[in-house]
Image (cartoon, rainbow, N blue to C red):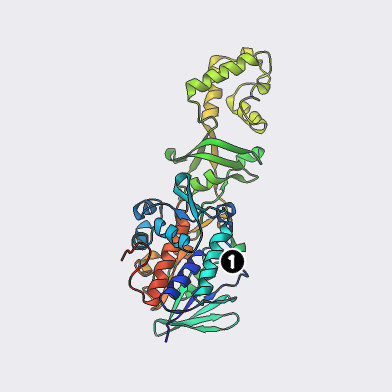
Amino acid sequence: MSKRIVVVGGGAAGMMAAISAAEGGAAVTLLEPNERLGKKLNITGKGRCNVTSNADAATLLANVPRNGKFLYSAFARFDGRDTMAFFEALGVPLKTERGNRVFPVSDRAFDISGALERRLRKLRVAIVRDRAAALEIKDGAVTGVTGERGSYPAQAVILATGGVSYPATGSTGDGHRLAAEAGHTVTELRGSLVPLLAPDCASLQGLSLRNVGLTVFENGKKIYTDFGEMLFTHFGVSGPMVLSASAHMRHFDKKTYRLEIDLKPALDEPTLDKRLVADFTKYANHDFCNALNDLLPQKLIPVVVERSGIESHRKVHDITREQRQSLLRVLKHFSVSVDGPCPVEQAIVTSGGVKVGEIDPKTMESKLVKGLYFAGELIDVDAYTGGFNLQIAWATGRAAGRAAAGTEECEGSGKQ
């Protein structure tokens, strides 16, 4: 008789776990309260789905700042290239873009979730619209799951419910509650890849900047730099570059953080100074506040003027070299004080989760409850942007599913 396995959660990790367990010959039931599987997966990468990183295990580990060592075995068995091969075998052509980010050629996240769902159905995984209410545990071993609509006996249960970010997609913390009730430690849940609170920038709300440089300072020390796009909001700053930067800002309770924006990264200071001289010559008889239209977005001009210390209605021909240098510093080092991250509900990824010391890193099985496994964002691991967090979901889901089914060898690239 086939081993009965219940997977709780129909997101990236849960679908991969269910597929892997079913491929190992298990009779799998997948519990998911949402009408659609992969609801959060479908909105990743602005709906394009950054599936993984075209990278080996070492590169993947280097991009996991929290408990990366725990993932060594999972990544060694199933790295970014294995993920690519997996999806291409399911009929989804992929492409690699800047930074080794991997997307479906179609730029449609639904192609990824659709391929997974077709595979689940082909493997006869029972997909049940129900929410897990409790784990059934007897004599230190899991025996099933009690749902809101029924009971599901099992010889193994895989929890893959996600974190607590984007609760509208179903990430409501159920898995953390179930893990805690089973005796597991759940570390503090915070947002990672999250917008930042910077109330001093309220006047810039709605301003989007492209092709700018960003530097993060922690207690005055430079810790991260990036180049790309960002957005000023009513609460502070957001956008792709800010979300990436936030993953490096992990100690707001102990340390202070500040951002510096290089508004003209393509120009070094001497070259930018020549540009300013040219603009000042062109607008020599204008007020200073009307002389920056060729250089900056309209919304940014009053703030830059104020920070430069130059009177806004001073005639440009009266501006001294020292004042021009002050303007130059503002343009190359536009400072943003950060009060903290936005609430975890607004984060793309949850930092924190089930303590990794209580999970076997090779099998993802609980060290406290026999037959209980974990996968994905529920675990206390998280990574930078670039497909690394989804790769954690694929690799841990794969490991948990295969171990729960009793499959010893791993597929993919033939790794053991």
Among the 4 quarters of the image, the one containing residue 415: bottom left
Quarter of the rendering occupied by the C terminus: bottom left
User: Where is residue 27 drawn, in percent x and y?
Assistant: 46, 80
Q: Position of residue 376 (x, y in %)?
A: 46, 64
**Could you tell me which quadrant the N terminus lies in?**
bottom left
Is residue 375 visible from the viewing direction of this image?
Answer: yes
Against 66, residue 276 (above or below) is above
Quarter assignment of residue 142: bottom left
Which of 235/238 is in front? 238
Is label 1 in a helix, a strand or a loop?
loop
Residue placed furthest toward the bottom: 1
Q: What residue is shown at x 40% (from left), y 51% (from top)?
A: 63
Res. 183 visible in picture:
no
**What residue do we see at 57% from left, 45% from top?**
239
Could you tell me how many numbered marks the image carries?
1
Task: Name above or below for residue 263 compared with residue 403.
Answer: above
Q: Residue 337, image x and y in percent?
A: 54, 40
Q: Is residue 316 left or right of residue 253?
A: right
- Rendered view: 133 above or below 68: below
In the rendered image, residue 354, in percent from the top left (x then y), is placed at 44, 66
Q: 146 above or below 403?
A: below
Please name the residue that numbered disc 1 is placed on. Answer: 170
Which amino acid lies under the numbered mark 1 shown in the image of this protein?
Gly
Quadrant location of residue 168? bottom right
